[in-house]
Amino acid sequence: MQAEISRRRTFAIISHPDAGKTTLTEKLLLYGGAVQLAGSVKARKDQRAATSDWMELERKRGISISSTVLQFDYAGYRVNLLDTPGHKDFSEDTYRVLTAVDAAVMVIDAGKGIESQTRKLFEVCRRRGVPIFTFMNKVDRPIRDPLALVDELESVLGIGAFPVNWPLGAGADFRGVFDRQALEVHLFERTSAGAYRAPVTIANLADPIVKDALDPADYARAAEELEMLEIAGKQYSAEEVLAGHLTPVFFGSAMNNFGVQLLLDSFLERSAPPAPHRAGDRLIAPDDPRFSGFVFKIQANMDPRHRDRIAFVRVCSGKFERDMIVTHAQSGEKVRLSSSHKLFGQERETIDEAWPGDIVGLVGHSALGIGDTLTQDPAIVYHEIPRFPPECFAYLHNPNPGKYKQFRKGMDQLLQEGVIQVFHLRDAGQRVPLLAAVGPLQFEVVQYRLESEYGAPSRIKAASWEILKWLRHGATAADLEALKLPTGCRIAEDGDLQPVVLFPTSWTLDYFRKQNPEVELYDVSADSRAG
């Protein structure tokens, strides 16, 4: 068991939109031997669609809407790579994926530096203590000063940064990188559309071939910067990296494959195998012989031919075996895990066993929900999936009574995926569900999928609230009655019957706090339980 655990690496790729996250995912698959020809997110007529973008709407819009699991073997490792949506409107999906990984690769556009969505996702990683590896992308285009990019990691994100390699030239003059620990130069050649592996020449920094390849000014600048890093830069510490206090930094270009293999090889060597997971007051070690895992994602209709739903389970301990009988901790019911799959984008194949760190897709099992625990030890219950505050609210109506059955079925299945949250207003005349999402594009996706996958058109009616905060878990009806609510504010309940307050503006939120100074408000549902 220990041998299987030690070779697992489970990580997510995160970034601001357009930083090159899905392109990097494709190139990691290319260098990992999982695909022979890298795809393009834009999916032009003469190119393959990206492996990780399986939904029709993703291919039409050229963006990642849903996170995707891609599992493959490389250099003795079993890699579980999770590609996440970059667009902020789909960040709830990314937040949940980050509960199921042991590390993250943060992609930054070297021409722009740290952007807003990058900062938000970094904070989620920091909250969970997830180690971060940084890839400065698009170095073959005009970029900001490399020293300034490293400084920004430290000043804006508050994390130490250690450049593992350093760019030699930039933009059209980018020729390669210098590996600071191996003391080797990697010179790259461009390939057609970056579809194949980039040829590499490895040489010493003082080698004439290196000086000939670089503009003299670029060579002198790189030598000076490298000297400055040795004198004033951070020292590398594996312990600090795994504790999330230091990020190894890599420079390259995913589009042209520059530095991708260096990133992959170095990440696998420097990252850690699966870590223990907390279940209440207990810490469950991966080598605990009893199987346990939790559901971090549910996706309906990945296979349009079968209209099924698949639950993504992160294995935390023990050995998973197909047809094993486990306890569904939330209901106490026994469940046979018969239809289990290894996932690669939309493709799937039946698997008979899995180990801690692996992601297993379970087809069927309609009782499973986001955050549920499956275990051979009923005492293990993971509380892994916090809910994050939505920013957009709307009612979704069925304009065609003849399509009610399709509309209801579609809504039930799509809501089970957990990306859109459902709330019910307290003391409402009619119990009409209020839908809430991190961004408005989520509503567009739900409407699109309702019509394309279930044949049910729908109509959106926006609601007036902009901010939601959770109240303390366990608040009584008397507690809620005693609240002094500003005009336009309402109390509602989430899917777990936890009370929340809806605010139409930030001013009403501030006024509520002044009127109710003793009341604690929480941004994340899990905090309200601990508070």
Image: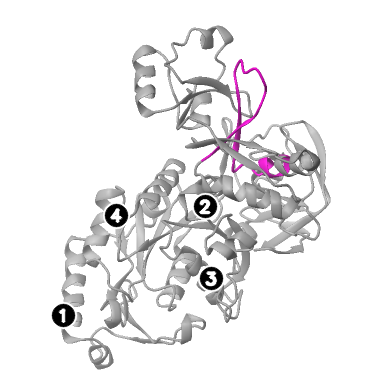
Looking at the image, residue 512 lies above or below residue 391: above
Residue 75: mark: none
Residue 153 - label: 4
Q: Quadrant of residue 167?
A: bottom left
Q: Look at the image and tell me whether residue 409 can be seen.
A: yes
Residue 458, x across and y down, in percent: 67, 43
**Region in magenta:** 412-437
Q: Nearer the viewer, mark 1 or mark 3?
A: 3
Distance Cα–Cα, label 1 vs label 3: 34 Å
Contact (CB < 8 A) between labels 1 and 4?
A: no
- What residue would you read off at disc 1? 220
Answer above or below: position of 293 versus 226.
Answer: above
Mark pair 4, 2: CA separation = 21 Å
Q: Which residue is mark 3?
A: 26
394 part of magenta stretch: no
Q: CA distance from mark 2 to mark 3?
A: 20 Å
What amino acid type should be assigned to the residue bearing mark 1? Ala
Residue 413 among those drawn in magenta: yes
Contact? badges 2 and 3 (CB < 8 Å): no
* Residue type at numbered disc 2: Asp
Coordinates of residue 32 in the picture (x, y in percent): 56, 74
